[in-house]
Image (cartoon, helix red, strand yellow):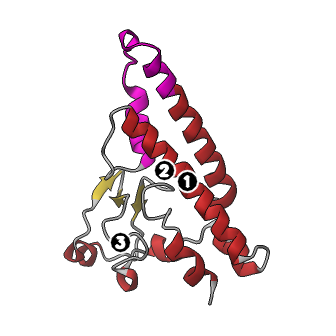
Amino acid sequence: MNGIDQLCPNCGLCCNGVLFADVELQQDDDAGHLIDLGMALKKKGMKRAFVQPCRFFDGKLCRIYADRPGRCAAFECGLLKRVQSGEMSAPAALKRIAAAKTLAEKVRRQLRRLGDQDEQLALTKRYSRMMSRPIDLSAGEDAGEARGELMLAVNDLMHVLQREFLR
């Protein structure tokens, strides 16, 4: 088994809105074909992009794998690169994936605790939206404490994502 077969179906962080908020299409991508497949595209500056979590990610695999955009086909996370180079074993990488997924779930729990139930929006977008809301000081210490816990959870997650997946 190669690294992709071992890691990717157990991860999905590049498709589920944890690593990326959106993915820009490349010049060679056939936007019309992607739209025909059901992909919703948005304008992002002069480019087109689709938002994460990707509607074609089924929790383990991409349902349009053969037709996926170029950025998706080209992306290899840091863990995958290290496994493929022999620098890290697949079981060690799987443990790091599990740890990152646990941290992402902690962020999701904190967001839900603060009233954000929108699981169809990337974590960074949800976090940004939550942090832009004013703190209701009349709600007691819990509101500020919950916001602080969210900030710490996001910090922990971003540190792991940068160290393990985005280098």
Expressed as whole percent of the image width and height from the top left, the position of residue 62 reads 39, 76
Amino acid under label 2? Answer: Glu
Q: Which residue is drawn at 53% across and 72% down?
A: 10
Expressed as whole percent of the image width and height from the top left, the position of residue 66 reads 38, 86
Question: Considering only vertical position in the picture, is 88 above or below 110?
Answer: below
Label 3 Cα neighbours within 10 Å, binned few <14 / some 14-19 / many ≥20: few
* Mark before the other along the chain sequence, 2 or 3: 3
The CA span between labels 3 and 1 is 19 Å
The answer to whether residue 2 is magenta is: no
Amino acid under label 3? Answer: Asp
In the rendered structure, the answer to whether residue 154 lies left or right of residue 86 reads left
State the quadrant of the N terminus.
bottom right
Q: Which of 148 and 70 is in front in this view?
A: 148
Q: Which of 57 and 142 is in front in this view?
A: 142
Q: Name the residue under label 2.
A: 105
Q: Name the residue under label 3.
A: 58
Question: Considering only vertical position in the picture, is 137 above or below 52?
Answer: above
Q: Mark 1 points at which residue?
A: 102
Amino acid under label 1? Answer: Thr
Which label lies toward us, 3 or 1? 1
- Which residue ends up furthest to the right in the rendered image? 87
The answer to whether residue 142 is magenta is: yes
- Which residue ends up furthest to the top in the rendered image? 138
Is disc 2 placed on a helix, strand or loop?
helix
Q: Which residue is drawn at 31% across and 42% down?
A: 117
| Boundaries of the magenta span | 123-147
C-beta proximity under 8 Å, tags 2 and 1: yes
Expressed as whole percent of the image width and height from the top left, the position of residue 110 reads 45, 37
